[in-house]
């Protein structure tokens, strides 16, 4: 059921799909929005901190990072990161 999605062709052309490893790779792009849901709950605190840094480094000026707080071990992240 969730193995695929249907995107409008114009939207698909505007999206860059790529593999990225938050544990080993550096910033991957300069983007205005980085949504991050349900990935940080699987990381220990040091890897969570690293991933948050990589996501932040990937933002353009005045970009937004959205990190889901529910059901996570990172509920104590600063409000600015959620």
Image (cartoon, rainbow, N blue to C red):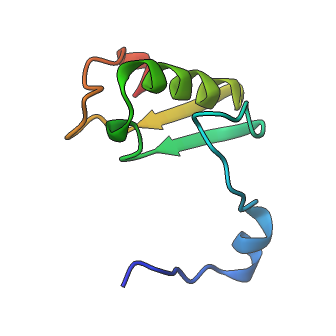
How many tags in the picture? Answer: 0
Near-viewer residue (23 or 81): 23
Question: Is residue 15 found left or right of 47 in the rendered image?
Answer: right
Near-viewer residue (68 or 10): 68
Quarter residue 51 falls in? top right
Near-viewer residue (23 or 30): 23
73 versus 49 height, above or below? below
Residue depicted at 25% across the width and 25% down the height: 75
Residue depicted at 72% across the width and 58% down the height: 18
Residue depicted at 39% across the width and 37% down the height: 40
Quarter residue 59 falls in? top right
Question: Is residue 76 found left or right of 18 in the rendered image?
Answer: left
Quarter residue 55 falls in? top right
Residue 56 at x, y = what percent? 61, 25
Question: Is residue 30 found left or right of 36 in the rendered image?
Answer: right
Residue 7 at x, y = what percent? 61, 79
Question: Where is the C terminus found, in terms of image quarters?
Answer: top left
Question: Is residue 31 found left or right of 34 in the rendered image?
Answer: right
Near-viewer residue (64 or 27): 27
Residue depicted at 66% across the width and 81% down the height: 8
Question: Where is the N terminus found, in terms of image quarters?
Answer: bottom left
9 versus 69 height, above or below? below
Residue 77 at x, y = what percent? 34, 18
């Amino acid at each position: 059921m969730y193995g695929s999605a249907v995107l409008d062709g114009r939207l698909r052309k505007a999206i860059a799909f790529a593999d990225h490893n938050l544990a080993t790779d550096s910033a991957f792009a300069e983007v205005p929005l980085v949504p991050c849901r349900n990935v940080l709950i699987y990381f220990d605190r040091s890897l969570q901190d690293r991933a948050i840094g990589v996501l932040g480094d990937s933002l353009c000026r005045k970009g937004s990072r959205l990190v889901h707080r529910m059901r996570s071990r990172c509920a104590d992240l600063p409000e600015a990161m959620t």
